[in-house]
């Protein structure tokens, strides 16, 4: 375990290296608190890549998982993109491959493939339009009603969008390993322990969990909801790393995890030591081949055009 003194030392050295490398550090809200603290921007995956693209940084250090670093490389192809822990992946993103998607498209000619941002660049390139958990409803509503929608890869998010839009959506059999662990009985137990608390959950959760929530939102949306709400207590149904930002941005309010099972090992794989090493060595790098990048960018641009 990294001691407070070591955290302080590494944080100072990272700050110096960041200036020397003209780097920007991005951290997803699920990362370790000390990693979030050294970041220039903390947020959700695509929003971080968009913010980095607007900077003058030569180097982008993405403290997250592989598909997030790929998104940064798609939006900033002339920058060096570093992923401090190269093995930090996303099991849900791995649940759809290019070959599987192409086969499904052959079975469903004319279908519009709506691709969750939690996918590889290659899968984005094979899709028609991307979405995030925050704008998925708007993206699906933009699809002509006479066109079938194939939603990949998160079936829980897809079911939520279908309920919100009333559209018939064909779902991929994918899910988030972390959110899938949250069960209705966990939420009910948390409510019993904290009867005054509102329940906020991510749309990657199971439908029977979503049915118990007071609000359903993306990570950024959940934090905004808590900040603007008059309520003082909240039960949080997403990866527990976000609790650090809740408590930082909403002083005077109490936040409780809906379950102690909501830990993503991939999100916790990045450490300050690895961030430091990445800035020293400028490795590991994440790149996206030009042909894949161009097609994936089109899917992202179509999303931005309707949201």
Image (spheres, helix red, strand yellow):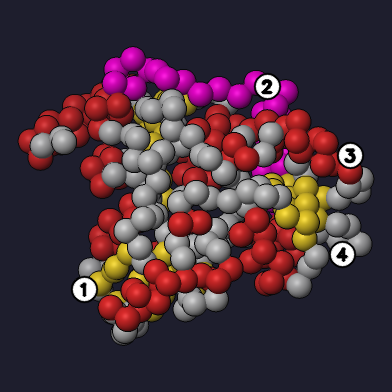
Residues at discs 1 and 2 in contact (Cβ within 8 Å): no
Which residue position is annotated with label 1? Answer: 252
Residues at discs 3 and 1 in contact (Cβ within 8 Å): no
Residue 277 located left or right of residue 149: left
Q: Which callout, 4 or 2, points to the residue nearer the camera?
A: 4
Is residue 235 among what the camera can see? Answer: yes
Disc 3, SS: helix
Q: Is residue 282 magenta?
A: yes
Q: CA distance from mark 4 to mark 2?
A: 33 Å
Q: CA distance from mark 3 to mark 1?
A: 54 Å
Which residue position is annotated with label 3? Answer: 106
Residue lying farthest front? 185
Sequence-first disc among 1 and 4 = 4
Q: Which residues are magenta?
A: 277-305
Disc 1, SS: loop
Give the position of the C terminus as an image quadrant: bottom right
- Which one is nearer the viewer's eye here, 39 or 240? 240
Residue 117 located left or right of residue 256: right
Measured as percent of width and height from the top left, residue 80 is found at 47, 22
Disc 2, SS: helix
- Which one is nearer the viewer's eye here, 194 or 69? 194
Which residue position is annotated with label 2? Answer: 290
Disc 4, SS: loop
Q: Quadrant of residue 166?
A: bottom right
Please tell me which residue is depicted at 42% across the width and 64% down the height of the picture. 237
Q: Principal SS element in the magenta part?
A: helix
Give residue 145's mark.
4
């Amino acid at each position: 375990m990294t001691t407070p003194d070591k955290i302080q030392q590494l944080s100072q050295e990272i700050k110096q290296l960041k200036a020397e490398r003209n780097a920007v550090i991005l951290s997803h809200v699920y990362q370790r608190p000390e990693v979030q603290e050294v970041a220039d921007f903390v947020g959700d995956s695509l929003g971080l890549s968009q913010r980095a693209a607007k900077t003058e940084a030569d180097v982008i250090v993405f403290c997250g998982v592989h598909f997030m670093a790929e998104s940064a490389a798609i939006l900033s192809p002339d920058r060096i993109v570093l992923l401090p822990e190269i093995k930090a992946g996303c099991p849900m993103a791995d649940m759809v491959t290019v070959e599987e998607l192409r086969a499904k498209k052959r079975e469903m000619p004319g279908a519009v493939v709506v691709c969750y941002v939690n996918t590889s660049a290659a899968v984005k390139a094979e899709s028609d339009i991307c979405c995030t958990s925050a704008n998925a409803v708007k993206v699906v509503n933009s699809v002509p009603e006479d066109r079938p929608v194939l939603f990949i890869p998160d079936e829980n998010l897809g079911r939520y969008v279908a309920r919100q839009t009333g559209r018939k959506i064909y779902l991929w059999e994918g899910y988030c390993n972390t959110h899938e662990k949250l069960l209705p009985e966990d939420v009910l137990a948390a409510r019993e322990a904290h009867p005054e608390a509102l329940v906020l959950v991510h749309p990657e959760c199971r439908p029977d969990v979503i049915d118990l929530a007071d609000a359903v939102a993306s990570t950024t949306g959940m934090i905004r909801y808590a900040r603007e709400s008059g309520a003082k207590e909240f039960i949080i149904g997403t990866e527990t790393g976000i609790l650090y930002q809740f408590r930082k941005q909403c002083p005077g309010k109490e936040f409780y995890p809906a379950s102690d099972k909501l830990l993503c090992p991939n999100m916790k794989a990045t450490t300050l030591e690895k961030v430091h090493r990445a800035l020293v060595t400028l490795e590991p790098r994440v790149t996206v081949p030009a042909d894949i990048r161009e097609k994936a960018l089109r899917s992202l641009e179509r999303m931005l055009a309707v949201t």
